[in-house]
Image: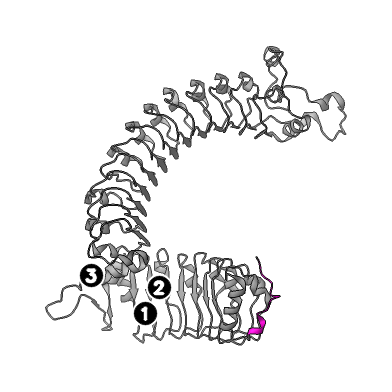
Amino acid sequence: MSRFKRLDDVVSLAGFETEKTEVTISYGLLKTARKSGHLNLSGKGLTEVPQNVYRLNIETPEDALQNVSFGASDRWWEVTDLITLILSSNQLTQLSDDIRLLPGLIKLDLHDNQLRSLPSALGELQELRELQLSHNQLSSLPVEICTLKNLHRLTLQQNLLESLPNEMGQLENLSELDLSNNCLKILPASIGCLKSLQKVSLCHNKLSCLPDSLTQLTNVKLLDCSNNQLSDIPASISKLLALEQLYLRHNNLRRLPQLHAPALKELYVGNNQIEQLEAKQLASLPSIILLELRDNKIKVLPEEITLLSMLTRLDLSNNDITSIPVSLSLLPNLKVLQLEGNPLRGFRRDLLTKGTNELLKYLRGRIQEGPERADGGRSAMTLPSQSMINVHNIKAFKELVYSEKQAVSIQDEVYDAAVGHDIVTVNFSKNQLTCVPPRLVEFHRSITDINLSFNKLQSCSPDICKLLQLTHIDLRNNQLGDLPSEMMNLTKLSTIILSFNRFKSFPEVLYKILSLETVLLDNNQVCSMEPRLLIKLVNLSTLDLSNNDLMNISPEVGLCTSLSPPIRALHALSVMLNVSAPVYNENFPTAG
């Protein structure tokens, strides 16, 4: 039975006040809705909501009039209240007060209509958790909406709203609010009472300032204020302790906000009028990963940019920058650097087209060597074994290199020199190691690249599988014949080099690492592989199995579309496998 009591006789007569012809919905559709609690009327060309929709919960189903036997397949007492009503993409211009007859609604979707106003009866839908009103013609909201205590998501983008009710702050459980593409010039102070908000979009309005109360939204993770008329951002915004993404594009900002937001990872301030970056502003972004400063008027990039040790992407396109500090190349995590559209001097222009790696390599090459000591030596660390380790590389590039030492083990002093640094790259190649150094797991949170090539490894310890950030492993020129099954946990691994080992078959675990892009297994003793499993490696673009014991190639290899285009990839592969070219023929199956 319905969990809401039948409304009294007066309310049950609602909807019969006019005698005009009603638009109705088919009995079958309503019958299904009574059972499921969900009714989708999207794109039906409706100009008004049919009365039999409003009365779905209170009218006696036709089944009850035709069959009340206990054996009936459609028992009328099993109906449920309507909890989802989708009326999107119609031509509705208004919504009747009869919406109150559906008090069990949890989701009401009215987006993409022509609504100019909303009935106060919406406030009676106290179970409502999601209300979608985007892409309408609303210029105001009824205050009754603000009484919906259970509302979690409210979307109002693409309307004509010029103001919001002061009672907006009563929506205490609201977690997502989208007010983008309206005509708002000011926000009510009560917006600061929406303590549950996590995602707020205010872009494409006419806001010239943000209310101080906005800083009370301590749970907000995403705030989008792009395409407004903001000339300043209050320093108090640093109280948004959970803020991770801040969008301020296309405003009138003349300075980078001093945020001190400890969790902020992405800051977008492109297309403003920022002329200067200050050290204190950069220092206030300790966790920033992405910084967009494109299309501003910045002239100088300060050395303090190197304080942003977590930075992976920096966009400085279309500014007035004439020189780049070489210290920029010391940012350990920087993967993308965009400088196009700047009047750079003393800079090879072709470098800008060669990608970030070449650009950073060029800048590193311009860094002068550190000053010599009195004894003529360079700054380095001497270990008891009299071997040297480059401390500068550890600090600047997060690289731990102990290569070509003919060491049978890695001494503790090597690891101790890297303590406190988030080591990204480890190079222990060209030694005499017979097992994977166990202390590598101490850097499991940061290591992405490991080189253990040219050693005497006879087995690969499962410990290496604890380095979950790994993207590149070089194990060439060892004595390996198998890989641990735990390696399937390396879900970010893109490249593995196993050349010149003792593998007799394609390692089973590699079929399960779907992130793989490059597998080099040449110069082994591989005599078999499974094309059916290889096909599952949808990202695999390079596979080298040359100089092995394979006698033929299964035509199924051609279905590996990532080795694209398939036919050409096979021809190349046949050479890498040292298999005769006749395998390549016109009847070869392709996946396209």
In which quadrant will I find the N terminus? top right
Q: Is residue 572 above or below residue 525?
A: above
Judging from the image, what secondary structure is the residue with disc 2 in?
helix
Query: Quick one: label 3 or label 2, which is nearer the N terminus?
Result: 3
**Residue type at the position of mark 3:** Ile
Question: Where does the magenta region start and end?
Answer: 581-591
Q: Residue at image x 47%, y 29%?
A: 171
Local crowd size for mark 1, using a 10 Å CA cut-off: few (<14), some (14–19), many (≥20): some
Report the front residue among 91 and 411.
91
Judging from the image, what secondary structure is the residue with disc 1 in?
loop
Q: Which mark is residue 410?
A: 1
**Main SS class of the magenta portion in the image:** loop
Local crowd size for mark 3, using a 10 Å CA cut-off: few (<14), some (14–19), many (≥20): few
Alpha carbons under labels 1 and 3: distance apart: 30 Å
Pointer 2 residue: 439
Are discs 2 and 1 less than 8 Å apart at CB? yes
Residue at the outermost left position: 374
Name the side, left or right, on which 346 lies relative to 115: left
Residue 56 seen in the figure: yes
In which quadrant will I find the C terminus? bottom right
Q: Is residue 547 above or below residue 300?
A: below
Local crowd size for mark 2, using a 10 Å CA cut-off: few (<14), some (14–19), many (≥20): few
Q: Which mark is residue 321?
A: none
Alpha carbons under labels 3 and 2: distance apart: 32 Å
Name the side, left or right, on which 566 lies relative to 147: right
**Residue type at the position of mark 1:** Ile
Q: Residue at image x 63%, y 78%?
A: 529
Name the side, left or right, on which 347 lies relative to 12: left
Judging from the image, what secondary structure is the residue with disc 3 in?
loop
Pointer 3 residue: 367
Query: Quick one: label 2 or label 1, which is nearer the N terminus?
Result: 1
Which quadrant of the view contains residue 313?
bottom left
